Image (cartoon, rainbow, N blue to C red):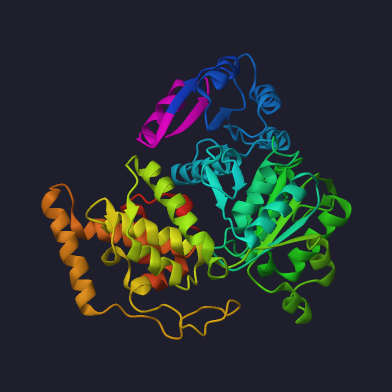
Amino acid sequence: MNKLLLIDDELDVQYSFRRIFDSPEIELITAASGEEGLKLIPKEEPDLVIMDVRMEGMNGLETLRRIRHADAKLPVIMMTAYGTTQTAIEAMKLGAYDYLLKPFDVPKLKQLVAAALKAARDMKQVVSYQPLLESEDYDLGIVGRSEAMQNVFKLIGQLAASDATALITGESGTGKELVARAIYHHSRRANKPFRAINCAAIPEGLLESELFGHEKGAFTGAATQRIGKFEQCDGGTVFLDEVGDMSLATQTKILRVLQSGTCERVGGNQPIKVDVRIIAATNKPLEQAVAAREFREDLFYRLNVVRILLPPLRDRREDIRLLVNYFLKKLAEAQKQRPKSISPEVMRVFEQYHWPGNVRELENAMQRAIVVAKGDVILAGDLSPEISGGSVPSASHAPGDSGKPSEATVPPAAELAALARALFQWAKHDGKLKVMPAVERELIINALIETNGNQVHAARLLGITRATLRKRVEKFKIKRELSVQ
C-alpha cells in the first residue's frame, strides 16, 4: 500500500483528496500545517507528500526546505491556487517533484501521483548484485553465477565508487534499468534523486521539454515555466533509457550537459548549472548508428566511458535455474502465497528454450504458469504454447546467434481448448471469478508488460485498436505505470 501525506489547511481540499484517493492501494494521511506535517513524516514514513504553497504558520517553501534537508528522496508535489506560478517554480528549484494549479484536473492529479509514486519506488528499491539467492538484503536483485554476470557485478562495484558516465548495452529484457539503479544505490549520490526517462516512450516533440524544461510561451500550450528532469535531479542521477532513439538535436543538448554541466530550457537562453550523473542504456548498436550518422560520435564517446554489456539469457543458461527459484519466491511474496515448485520437465524446457525476450520473458512466463497451475507444482501443461510447443533451438544453435524463431508459433486449437477448460474448471470452484473479464484484464496487463507499457505495440499485439485498449485500461483500473502514451 502506498502512503500519501497531504499538507493543506483547507478542509475542503482534504475532503476532496479523501474522495479522489478512496482506494485500498493508497492510505491518505492529512496535516493542517507545515509544522504538523514535519512531525508526521518520520512517524508515518509516507511515500509521497502533496503540499499547499500558502498556509498559516510555516509556509510551503520553508516546509519543503526542511523536508529536502531531512530526506532528499521523498517526492513532494506542490499546489498553488494563485494566478502566478512563480512561487511554485521556486519550489521546483528547491527540489519539488512537480506542482499543480488549483483547482486541479483530477485525471491529471492521479497521473502525476502515479508517476511520483513510481519515482519513489525507484529510489527506495535497493538493487543489489548478488550471485547467490541466500542473501536477504535486497528487494529486487540482479541474479547470476555465470562468469558473464560476475564481470557485470565487478563493473557495477567499480562504477558505484566513482561518478563516471556509464553506457549499459544489451538486448531488450536483460535488466538494464536494474543495473542502472544498482549503480545509483551503491554510489555517493544514493541520498539524492534518481530519475529514469525512457527516450523511446516520450514523443520527440516533448522529450526536450521533459529533460530540460521550458519557458512560458516557448511553444503552443506552454502556459507556464516548467523545470526539467535535469534541474529536478540536481545532485542526483539521471538514467536515459533507449538513448539511441534520441534526435540529433536532443543529443546535442545532452552533450552540452556532459561537457559543461549546464543546460537551457526550451525557449530560454540562460545557462543553468546542474550537477547530474548520467547513466545511459540502449539495445541498439550505437557504433552502427554513429557510422550511419544517426548518433553523434562525440556524444557516443562521452557516454561510453565505462561500458557494461549485459549478456542475453541464452548465453548464460547456467543462471536460469537460479532465476526460476528467485522469481518463484518474489512472485509468491507479491501475492502473499506460499511459493510453488517446478517439475523437472518444466525446468528442462526452461533451460533449453531460446528466450528471445530474455529475463523479462522468463519472469512473465513464471507469472503465467503460477496463475494457470492447478496445484502447488508447475507442470509442462501450465506453460504457454510458445515456450513448450517445440520452439527449442536445434543443437547447431550457436551461443552468439540471435536465438529468434524463424516463424511465429501459432497455438493449436486443441491447446487453446485445453486452456479454456482449465479456466472454467477454476471458475467452478470460485463463484466470484468471471472468466471473460478476468482473462481480458490479464491479457491487457501482460501485453503492456511485454511491450514495456507501449500502448501502440500492446494494442497491435492484442489485435485491437489503441482507443479500445485505452478504454479497457480505464475499465479494469490497470495501474498507469504499466502504460505510457
| Residue at figure coordinates x 76%, y 50% from the top left | 159
Residue 253 appears anywhere in the view: no
In percent of width and height, residue 95 lies at 69, 35
Residue at the extreme front: 344
| Residue at figure coordinates x 64%, y 35% from the top left | 73
Q: Does the segment drawn in magenta span residue 71?
A: no
Residue at the extreme right: 260
Which residue is more in the foreground, 303 or 40? 303
Residue 378 lies, with reference to residue 185, above or below; the image says below
In percent of width and height, residue 270 lies at 85, 49
User: Which image quadrant for residue 184?
Assistant: top right
| Residue at figure coordinates x 35%, y 43% from the top left | 335
Residue 4 lies, with reference to residue 273, above or below; the image says above
| Residue at figure coordinates x 69%, y 58% from the top left | 151
In percent of width and height, residue 111 lies at 49, 46
User: Which image quadrant for residue 441?
Assistant: bottom left
Q: Is residue 249 left or right of residue 347?
A: right
Residue 51 lies, with reference to residue 133, above or below; the image says above
Which residue is more in the foreground, 404 or 258? 404
Which residue is more in the foreground, 53 or 181? 181
In percent of width and height, residue 468 lies at 34, 65
Residue 397 appears anywhere in the view: yes
Quarter of the picture containing the N terminus is top left
Which residue is more in the foreground, 111 or 346? 346
Which span of residues is magenta-colored? Answer: 1-27
Figure label count: 0
Q: Is residue 464 left or right of residue 414?
A: right
